[in-house]
Image (cartoon, rainbow, N blue to C red):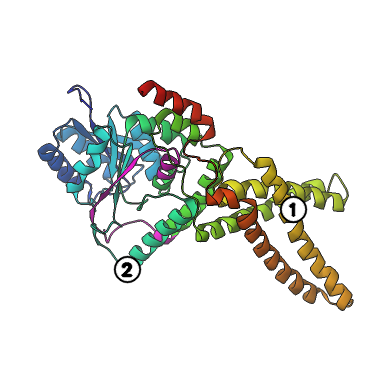
Amino acid sequence: MAHSPDLLALDVALPVFNEQASLEQSVRTLHDYLTAEFDATWRITIADNASTDETAAIADRLAGELPGVITVHLTEKGRGRALRRVWLDSPAEVVAYLDIDLSTDLRALPPLIAPLLSGHSDVAIGTRLARSSRVVRGARREFISRSYNLLLRRTMAVTFSDAQCGFKAMRRDVAQQLIPLIEDGGWFFDTELLVIAERSGLRIHEVPVDWVDDPDSKVDIVQTAREDLKGMIRVARSILTGRVPVERIYAELGRRPFKQPRSPSFFGQVVRFGVVGALSTVAYALLYLGFEHLVDGQIANFLALLLTAIANTAANRRFTFGVQGRSGVMKHQFQGLVVFGIAWLITSGSLFTLHAINPGANSRVQLIVLTVANLFATLVRFVLLRVWVFRRQRAGGRPNDIPDSTRPIALEKKAARS
């Protein structure tokens, strides 16, 4: 890809909050490196996230002293908010960001940017989890990071290895498409961006990095991980419901060959099945409370169960077992109702059997029986969904390497290139 000398090639964002101690040294180090090593045009954008110390003043002074450095002041905290503002406003061909502590060795910056400037890739990330990466950090952070990324790959069926490394870049046209779809304004911004990008068929380039942990980091690892788990559920729901239009993004930006995300592993299916079950329980309770004011209790129970079963089958079809497209939807719903009926017979039959054997069973005994029956019924539902309802799709049904709604567009693109 040719670059006009009049166009800005790279814009590196540095989100900061109360970083008066490290800001000046980090900015000058980055400025010196880019000046010496980067041939294309560049600039550094300091994104001050409503700092309450001297960070804003130092940032303004550096912008006045160093050519190619600007400052943007935000009124709210949040790394995601800062990147949203800076990246969407940037005129650069490639937008990037680094953690202000410069934990990542800057020699990894050219390999990060090059495939984006050449047009080879859409998003580029640093990874601390590659075999060739050299990482210095405590055992607790290492364990949490690896566990989080393993859970992410197993439950979200993604392939990138390190979602939270503070060393990322993307092409501006991709940023303009993806960033408006991202809801998180904090630390989960990175993960949400990458999940949407991969699900949209975009190419993510990974660069092994040398990384040294900042002992003075202000990030609360446990709290961040907790919020990330909530974010994973929200993003999965948004993709499932079509709120995030991954097929439209693929039609406009996606690359050939497009491969649908791999079907979740057995572990991932179990986790997803549990998440869907928990949400279905909440949905049932809300529906029952709404219906009981309008109809008889038995009818309210039936309607709530029926609607929940339909939604549960649809969610498990798309989210748990990764079945795409509209083919077989009605058949799957019918089979799902059969599976639901079997599970309902197990639970109701357990009480019937208990009362037949011990008519005077107290509430504690009934609760124990129902609990065991529900656990068994849940196991039966999962097994039947996995080996019967969605068996052919898991085993490899109709080729599904292009989403249904984008297949004609993709074929037209192919014909045009022929």
Residue 396 in the image, given as x and y percentages of width and height: 52, 48
* Residue 338 belongs to the span the image colors magenta: no
Q: Amino acid at mark 2?
A: Ala
Residue underneath mark 2: 139
The label number, if any, that marks residue 338 in the structure image:
1
Residue 86 in the image, given as x and y percentages of width and height: 33, 34
Residue drawn 79% across the image and 73% down it: 366
Q: Amino acid at mark 1?
A: Val
Residue drawn 67% across the image and 53% down it: 280
The label number, if any, that marks residue 293 in the structure image:
none
Image mark count: 2
Residue 409's place in the image compared with 95, above or below, is above
Which class describes the residues within 10 Å of circle 1: few (<14), some (14-19), or many (20+)? Answer: some
In the rendered structure, the answer to whether residue 30 lies left or right of residue 242 reads: left
Which class describes the residues within 10 Å of circle 2: few (<14), some (14-19), or many (20+)? Answer: few
Residue drawn 53% across the image and 31% down it: 405
Residue 47 in the image, given as x and y percentages of width and height: 31, 39
Q: Residue furthest left?
A: 36
Residue 73 in the image, given as x and y percentages of width and height: 33, 36
In the rendered structure, the answer to whether residue 26 lies left or right of residue 340 reads: left
Q: Quadrant of the N terminus?
A: top left
Residue drawn 74% across the image and 46% down it: 307
Q: Describe the element under mark 2 as helix, strand or loop.
A: helix
Residue 18 visible in the picture: yes
- Residue span colored magenta: 193-222
Q: Describe the element under mark 1 as helix, strand or loop.
A: helix
